[in-house]
Image: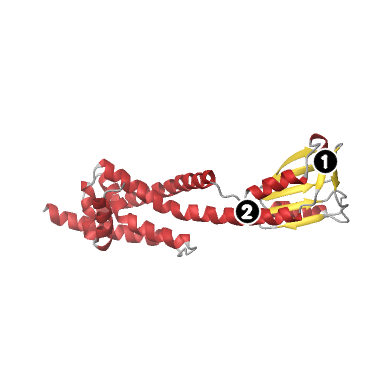
Amino acid sequence: MIPISLLRLITTTFFHPSEIWKAIELNKRKTTFLFLLICFFVSIPYFISGLSQFSLMANDMERIESHLPAFIIEDGQIIFEEPLDKAIVAKTDFVNLIIDTNDQYEDRLEQKDIQNTPINLLFSKEHVSFYATGIPITFAYTDLNGLTDNFLRTILLQFSNTTVVLILTMIVFSFITGTFEAVFHLFYFTLLANLLSAFMKVRLPFSINWKMIMLASAVPFLLFSVMNSFSIQPGGQTYILLTIVLYMYYKGVKSYLKNIT
């Protein structure tokens, strides 16, 4: 659990940047908490975006499932419960279903569909192909004897089930992505803070500047993460964030100079 004193310090320094210099007093435990908190803030939009994309994909899978005809594969052939008069082409943003066992669908349109959609399921005369980002995995019907539409329906509808494992996986990947982004920004901001402190004729170790930059950026990171989660992304967001953080750092260093003299 994050110490109350650290949370109080974060909020206090946001409204009173001159207190940023107190980051010098943070011990390793609180510094680690602060870093993980920032990574968490940055990861929020990734998690929300991933959850939203998964929900859209699940809806597309359901739509595709509704267009899948009843069939069974026997003796190396696909046999439909009701003969197909024409090719079945069901398109969504994430998934396409193309059943063209009589070579009725134009190759040009087929290739265009495959290139423009992440996932494609294509039934041709002699095989079924699964395309993920344009890369095909093909199975001949002779190797799929006994396969029915029910098996594919189960897989397609499985995406509608948001499981605990899925949520935890998304949290982990979102946090890892957020950590990489947070480290990049913090390191970049700290390098500029070193230059700014040198310009102000203050020699502060990189580790101290790192703590001050983390403290200065915690609330701004949270505010931008909330906006990004609602698809609000201001132009030049990184530069706005940089300006806010360096301004707070500058105020903190000036206050630090007054306190040590």
Q: Which residue ends up furthest to the left in the rendered image?
A: 261
Where residue 50 appears, x then y in whole percent?
53, 52
Where residue 17 appears, x then y in whole percent?
25, 60
Which of the numbered marks, if any, corresponds to residue 73? 1
Q: Which tag, 2 or 1, sits closer to the chain's start?
A: 2
In the visual, does 42 lie left or right of 162? left
Which of the numbered marks, if any, corresponds to residue 247? none
Amino acid carrying label 1: it is Ile
Amino acid carrying label 2: it is Ala
Circles 2 and 1: CB atoms closer than 8 Å:
no
Helix, strand, or loop for circle 1? strand
Mark 2 crowd level (few <14, some 14–19, many ≥20, 10 Å Cα): many
Q: Nearer the viewer, residue 151 or 19?
A: 151
Residue at the (22%, 48%) spot, across then down: 24
Where residue 201 appears, x then y in whole percent?
21, 52
Mark 1 crowd level (few <14, some 14–19, many ≥20, 10 Å Cα): some
Helix, strand, or loop for circle 2? helix
Which of the numbered marks, if any, corresponds to residue 58? 2
In the visual, does 13 lie left or right of 147? left
Residue 7 visible in image: yes
Where residue 202 appears, x then y in whole percent?
21, 51
Residue at the (18%, 57%) spot, across then down: 255
